[in-house]
Amino acid sequence: MLDLNHKFVLLPRERVYFTSPSRTTLSLQTPNSYPGKEPLSISCSGGIAYITNQRIVYLPTSPTPKLRSFSAPILNLQDTHVDTPFFGANSWTGILKPVSGGGIPAHHAYVKLSMTFKDGGAFDFATIYERIKETMSQAIEVARESGRQTQGSDLSDVNLEQLPAYEEVGTTVSVSAPPPIQQPIPISPTASAQGSSRDSGIMLSSDDERNPKPPPVAASQQQYPPPDGPPPGYEEAQQSSVAENLERNLRISH
């Protein structure tokens, strides 16, 4: 996998699509959901992560006897996602199914893989990985539907740039114009003999709708014309009042 300059050797028709900064960390551990007899724990504090059209590769900056290099096929990872902690760098995590003879003990059916991108690049790594994985999965699905063998098939010649978008076989999705908006039809007040409804929910008869009655006017708001003369008995009342005042004054003077 490595040459004399400690650089990984590309496989036939392999191309590199992503290279991370050199301070990317790697962690391989036994997940809690798949406990093994002997828990696995391998980590590296610095290295470079690569994505090719066939696999992901990690090369430690300072190789150790326990970890000189790491690689995994693209389709052997599942549940991959980016973790964004409140403090610290983002990390890319997934569940790995180890390949036979790859250096991980056979009794570990699954291993949790985590890469922390201290200098950024987690989202770019995840986006490119998902795109390549989706393209390879579509190529396998197309080969299966055409009757070709997919187990152990070589996907290195899959064109990641020009592969058309995947469509379900036997289904056709057509995009039609939106339905026209129906114009409201005016309704005559006499169209219904029973009555017509209003937005408030009150039912009005047709006669009431055609000839609405004005609201009643309060007695305090009614206006009356001014009187033409004094009220009846006004003059008699005035004369009686004057006579009483005169008689009262005469009594006081005597």
Image: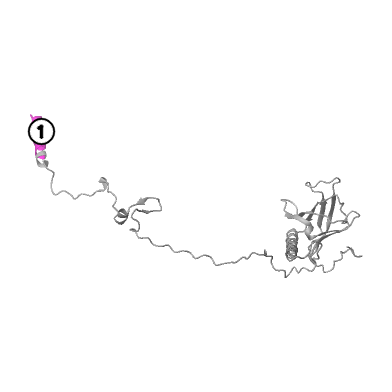
x and y percent of residue 131 in the render? 73, 63
Camera-side residue: 53 or 170? 170
Q: Residue at x 73, y 55 (%)?
A: 82
Residue in front for this viewpoint, 146 or 2:
146
Q: Which residues are magenta?
A: 238-254
Quarter of the picture holding the C terminus: top left
Residue most toward the top?
A: 254
- Relative to residue 34, is residue 226 drawn left or right? left
Work out whether residue 172 or residue 133 is closer to the camera in this orientation and state it: 172
Residue 100 horizontal/vertical position (percent) = 86, 56
Can the viewer see residue 90 in this picture?
no
Dividing the picture into quadrants, the one containing residue 79 is bottom right
157 is within the stretch colored magenta: no
Identify whether 99 is placed above or below 178: above
- Which residue is label 1 attached to? 249
The amino acid beneath tag 1 is Asn
